Image (cartoon, rainbow, N blue to C red):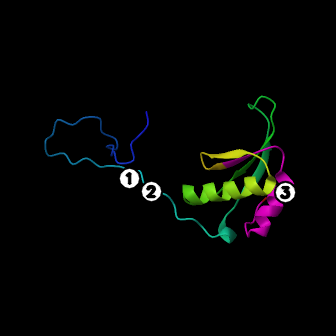
């Protein structure tokens, strides 16, 4: 079930018979502010399982908005010259580019391991 950006859903209540009950709504638009590169704690790892034998490099640990994560992912894919995607707060790069990504991230000011 996908949520519409303008829809609000009540937190913890399915239905109330009390006409005076005040529903609490969750805010769908809350995203953490993007930390400066020097305060990010990015981890770079290689993964092969569950991907049909294909090797991918995953960058995790980014704290910030989805737009900033997409921008960083696009930059890393371009610099490596390969494809990839950004899903669930992770940057997925096709192939084993661990050393290159750590070098690129350090050049950009991110302390990566």
Helix, strand or loop status at disc 2: loop
Q: Are marks 1 and 3 in contact (CB under 8 Å)?
A: no
Measured as percent of width and height from the top left, residue 77 is found at: 74, 52
Please identify the quarter of the rendering in which residue 71 is found: bottom right
* Residue under the image location 15 percent in, 40 percent down: 18
Q: Nearer the viewer, residue 55 or 75?
A: 75
* Residue under the image location 60 percent in, 67 percent down: 35
For residue 70, above or below residue 92: below
Please identify the quarter of the rendering in which residue 4 is found: top left
The reply to whether residue 63 is visible in this rendering is: no
Residue 113 is left or right of residue 75, and the answer is right
> Which numbered disc, 3 or 2, marks the residue closer to the eye?
3
Measured as percent of width and height from the top left, residue 8 is found at: 33, 46
Helix, strand or loop status at disc 1: loop
Disc on the earlier residue, 1 or 3 = 1
- Give the label on residue 27, or none: 1
Query: In this view, which residue lies farthest toward the left?
Result: 19
Distance from the alpha carbon under mark 1 to that under mark 3? 38 Å
Q: Dot 2, how many residues are within 10 Å of its Cα: few (below 14), some (14-19), or many (20+)? A: few
Magenta stretch encompasses residue 75: no
Residue 2 is left or right of residue 25, and the answer is right
* Residue under the image location 67 percent in, 59 percent down: 72
Helix, strand or loop status at disc 3: helix
Q: Are marks 3 and 2 in contact (CB under 8 Å)?
A: no
Q: Are marks 2 and 1 in contact (CB under 8 Å)?
A: yes
- Give the label on residue 100, or none: 3
Disc on the earlier residue, 3 or 2 = 2
């Amino acid at each position: 079930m996908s949520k519409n950006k303008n829809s609000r859903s009540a937190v913890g209540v399915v239905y109330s018979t009390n006409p005076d009950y005040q529903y609490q709504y969750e805010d769908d638009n809350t995203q953490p502010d993007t930390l400066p590169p020097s305060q990010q704690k990015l981890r770079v790892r290689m993964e092969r399982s569950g991907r049909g034998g294909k090797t991918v490099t995953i960058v995790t640990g980014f704290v910030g908005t989805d737009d900033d994560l997409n921008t960083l992912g696009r930059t890393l894919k371009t610099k490596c010259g390969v494809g990839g995607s950004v899903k669930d707060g992770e940057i997925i790069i096709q192939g084993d580019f661990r050393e290159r990504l750590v070098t690129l991230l350090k050049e950009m000011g991110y302390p990566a391991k």
